[in-house]
Image (cartoon, grey):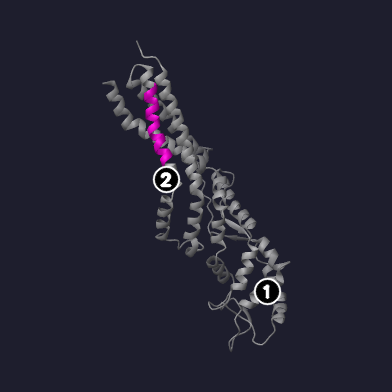
Amino acid sequence: MRKFIGGIFALVLVLPLLLAAQASVSVITFALDRDFYIRAVDSQPVYDVILSERIISQLVFERFPLPPEADTRPLENFLQDTLTRDYLREQLSRVINDLFDFLQGRSDEFQPSINIAPVKNAITGERTDEFLRALVAALPVCQPGQTPGFNLEAGTACKPSGVPEDAIVAQLEGTVVPLLAFLPDEIRLSEESIDETGWRFFLPGMAVPASLILSVLFLSFITLCFWYIGALIADDSWRIRLQWLGWTLLVPAVIIFLVGLSFGSNIPSFWVQYGLERADFSGLPFPQSAGMLLNAVIRAALPMVARSFMMVGGISAAFSLGFIFWGLATPRKK
């Protein structure tokens, strides 16, 4: 009768709690680690998407009043050479660090931005001539009635017909370069900043990461209590109790380990791609490429997520086998 009650107790309460606790520990090991997100974005597929022709072309047409038929390939090549991997890594790491500083209560506001000072210095400094020649190559020839130069109000730009390229470059160097020097050093990725601090605290003085860790610790403590109580209900001998502890821990441990294996396979990648293809990214800065970028980041993060689940599942399985063999080695009650 005791074993039947213990089995019902384990099936209804202990096993779900053990599964939830192991899953929470697996998630908390990477979800609160800022280095996890930095490593996820610091991958070649992510940089390939950022420096893709689609994003660079959209960036060029947003910053320069060029007509759709303009040949922007020289200007795009210049930007791709300027936006190096080290520069992108620094900017992405900066955004992630600012977000975690905000979540941990070290700052009162989070407004993601990109420092364009290195790019601006390259344009107005040692690579000025290269940039201006790429810009001149992208400018269309003025039509009858058009004024050569940049008309920001009308959103048009053109170059005079029959004028040598060197002369146009010299003229732009005296007009465009000084204007570029007055550009801000930072570009905000969002117009609105996040400065609400009330939701960041679970307890007074405790920020979101600490609150989540406290919640996982509380769940683990409750799970250990019910796990131990279930062993006491199952039998009155420690030989059976230890085996009961081992088998009830082994089942969720195997499930968590299999979840980790599934994250390392192609199954999640398929469903991620399926969901991103049907998602709406109209509110993001680059809606046409946001799905590709998120897909690249998720693909880079999945192996690390898989290792976390497999590690927790493997350690839990090792403890469960230890309890089982400990119970088998315990003498029977006389």
Q: Amino acid at mark 1?
A: Leu
Left/right of residue 133 with respect to residue 101 in the rendered view:
right
Q: Is residue 296 visible?
A: yes
Left/right of residue 77 with respect to residue 199 in the rendered view:
right
Q: Amino acid at mark 2?
A: Ser
Q: Quadrant of the N terminus?
A: top left
Considering only vertical position in the picture, is 324 above or below 257?
above
Left/right of residue 188 with respect to residue 14 in the rendered view:
right
Most frequent secondary structure within the magenta stretch: helix
Q: Quadrant of the C terminus?
A: top left
Q: Position of residue 266 (x, y in %)?
A: 43, 51
Q: Which residue is found at the position 70% from the left and 64% from the top?
A: 121
Q: Which residue is mark 1?
A: 132
Which of 242/291 is in front? Answer: 242
Secondary structure, mark 2, is helix
Q: Which residue is found at the position 59% from the left and 44% from the top?
A: 106
| Residue range corresponding to the magenta coloring | 242-258
Q: Which residue is found at the position 60% from the left and 69% from the top?
A: 76
Secondary structure, mark 1, is helix
Q: Which residue is mark 2?
A: 262
Which of 32/78 is in front? Answer: 78
